[in-house]
Amino acid sequence: MTDLAVIGLGYVGLPLAREATEAGLAVVGYDENARVVSGLNQARSHVDDVTGAEVRAMLDAGFSATCRAAVLGGAHVVVICVPTPLHPDGSPDLDPVCRATRTLAPFINPGMLVVLESTTYPGTTDEVVRPALERATGMTAGVDFHLAFSPERIDPGNKGFGLRNTPKVVGGLTPACAQAAAAFYGKVCDTVVMAKGTREAEMAKLLENTYRNVNIALVNELAVVAHELHVDLWDAIACAATKPFGFQSFRPGPGVGGHCIPVDPNYLIHQARAAGSAVRLVELAQEINQGMPGYVVRRAAQVLADTGKPLAGAKVLLAGVTYKADVSDLRETPARPIVRALRTAGADVSYHDPHVPAFVVDELPVRRARDVVRAAAAVDLTVLLQPHAAYDVDAIVAASSLALDARGCTHSGAELL
Ligand SMILES: NC(=O)c1ccc[n+]([C@@H]2O[C@H](COP(=O)([O-])OP(=O)(O)OC[C@H]3O[C@@H](n4cnc5c(N)ncnc54)[C@H](O)[C@@H]3O)[C@@H](O)[C@H]2O)c1
């Protein structure tokens, strides 16, 4: 018998499978992507926070990945960790969740615990997953099988906090469902927090990510104003952060990226609108953050113009193109709209990133520089987008004839955003 089956072996599902395997549970992973499955079965990890050696240790401990859904039938617990992207119009795309639910339905056993971990709007577990499973099985959630929601709080690249030591919120369809979920997560997490229900657990995750999104938008908007007012906003933030209470610092940047921060607020916006309401602050934050790549390009043009050079024809190096430092994830990276706008303006764009061997924008590869300091010396402008730990940012600035620091991480010589 399998203790745990994980559906979706990505940034969220694979660390869960690793933690559960390490805790001594019998774990299988189901993923519809054959490349992901065969890579894992050959001890190759496609996720930054899980090493190949860790996958090897998982396999040695009995873990296996598969594209065969039948493995789900033998599991006590099934956790769904599939993506929750957006449709092209910005509305929630629950298709992966619905497909995973349909795949699971024929294999639900009496007493099984089913948990949704994918970030989504309040009501998804109760109004989308529950009826789909009940219709397909003829069983009743909360009576014949347990159903719960538990948001994943993984922070890729974070060395201090992982699944084990980050408190895990669980919300059950019924108190018994919540107990079952708490008992399971108690095996892989140090602290389990019980939400009132699935809706509160779903909302908690959206609140966390929307809180980040809104606060990042605040400092991004302030960065634009601070430039006009001749204020070094990063210095002002460092000063404000010395207040021991009531202030948490966020830092401006070229825009938000990744699968969560730019995407999740739309789940809230959509649900609020569907309910005839609006989350105006959240909508505004989305607009401000989405405007940052354009602002970076306008600042690049200004910095060049100050030395008498037009952006058209200028050689521009982007240093760090991932959505945040020290990861290889390019999903929703602001570097993509920045490349697009620079190309439109006629700039000659290249990039350097120790984590990205190839960077393609609109099916056109961006030229890759192998040595960031040498490349910085050869261009008209270096734009520092991500302060990867591998970078000596001050050496990059020193080598550049002009540098724009979009992260406020350099000490002197660079223009700030
Ligand atoms: N990446 C993060 O940092 C993070 C953090 C917290 C929460 N989340 C949330 O967790 C969820 C998963 O995100 P992720 O980053 O792990 O995604 P991911 O793209 O890294 O991995 C998802 C995996 O699921 C597989 N998959 C998709 N649909 C499937 C289906 N119907 N059946 C089986 N496999 C399927 C894909 O092949 C892929 O391997 C999302 O809702 C996301 O918002 C992500």
Image: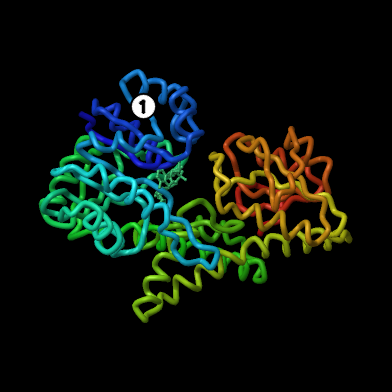
Instruction: Please state if 188 lies on the left or on the right of 103 as rendered.
Output: left
Rendering coords of residue 28 (x, y %): 32, 31
Please say if 386 is above or below 241.
above
The quadrant where residue 205 appears:
bottom left
> Which residue: 30% across, 61% down?
128
From the viewer's side, name the closer residue of 102 and 315: 102
Q: Is residue 211 visible?
A: yes
Residue at 36 percent across and 48 percent down: it is: 100
The 10 Å Cα crowd at callout 1, few under 14, some 14 to 19, many 20 or more, is many
161 left or right of 108?
right
Image quadrant in which the C terminus is located? bottom right
- The residue drawn where x is 25% and y is 42% is 107
Residue at the image point whose x is 35% and y is 41% from the top: 7
Nearest to the observer: residue 46 or residue 192: 46
x and y percentages locating residue 303 in the rendered image: 78, 60
- Which residue sits furthest bottom? 276
How was the colour assigned to the protein in this rendering? rainbow
Q: Which residue is the site of mark 1?
A: 64
Q: How many marks?
A: 1
Across and down, in percent, residue 273 comes to: 40, 76
Residue 387 vertical placement versus 232 (above, below): above
Q: Secondary structure at mark 1?
A: strand
